[in-house]
Image (tube, rainbow, N blue to C red):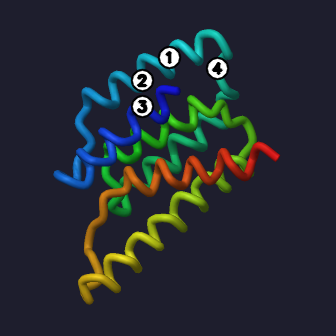
Amino acid sequence: MLYFLLALPISIADIASRKIPNIYLQLYAYAVAVLVVFRGVPDLIFILVVLVTLFLMSAIGVGMGDCKLLGLIVLMLQLSRFQEFELLLLEIFMIALIQIVLIWLYSKVIPRTIAMAPAIFIGTSLYLATSQS
């Protein structure tokens, strides 16, 4: 439920300023912390792989707010297998690529930066739709 409640304000803030305000991430983190307390903590090796992946994404130019949001979503979804994480990332990056192409077609200029929060939320929604079969 919280996933959908915060998706719109986070996406709007990211589109407007190319930054995700920490207040939204804090609210998200509190809710995810409650879920982790009740569901349990994922495997330590998996958490390390996710952290290294997020660090590498940050190093290549993905914003820190986007990385934090993605980390919280991984905890919220309680992913436990590497293939699930790979599929989530693939769907997010495919939506980001579609976003870049649409901006390019509309403005005739390839964007140097994009707001990734909409791609993260749409990609996560696609992941949830395809993994529930």
The answer to whether 78 is drawn above or below residue 63 in the figure is above
- The disc placed on residue 5 is 3
Q: Secondary structure at mark 1?
A: helix
Report how far apart the C-alphas of labels 3 and 1 lie in the structure. 17 Å
Check contact, mark 3 vs mark 4: CB within 8 A.
no
The residue labelled by disc 4 is 41
Q: Earlier in the sequence, mark 1 or mark 4?
A: 1
Q: Position of residue 50 (x, y in %)?
A: 56, 42
Report how far apart the C-alphas of labels 4 and 2 lie in the structure. 14 Å
Check contact, mark 3 vs mark 1: CB within 8 A.
no
Q: How many numbered marks are there?
A: 4
The residue labelled by disc 1 is 33
Residue at far bottom of view: 108
Report how far apart the C-alphas of labels 3 and 4 lie in the structure. 24 Å
Q: Residues within 10 Å of mark 4 (few under 14, many from 20)?
A: some
Check contact, mark 1 vs mark 2: CB within 8 A.
yes
Q: Earlier in the sequence, mark 3 or mark 1?
A: 3
Q: Residues within 10 Å of mark 2 (few under 14, many from 20)?
A: many
Q: Residue 23 is drawn in which quadrant?
A: top left
Report how far apart the C-alphas of labels 2 and 3 lie in the structure. 14 Å
Tag in front: 4 or 2: 2
Left or right, 97 with reference to 19: right
Q: Earlier in the sequence, mark 4 or mark 2?
A: 2
Tag in front: 2 or 3: 3
The three-letter code of the residue at mark 3 reads Leu
Q: Secondary structure at mark 2?
A: helix
Tag in front: 3 or 4: 3
The residue labelled by disc 2 is 29
Q: Secondary structure at mark 3?
A: helix
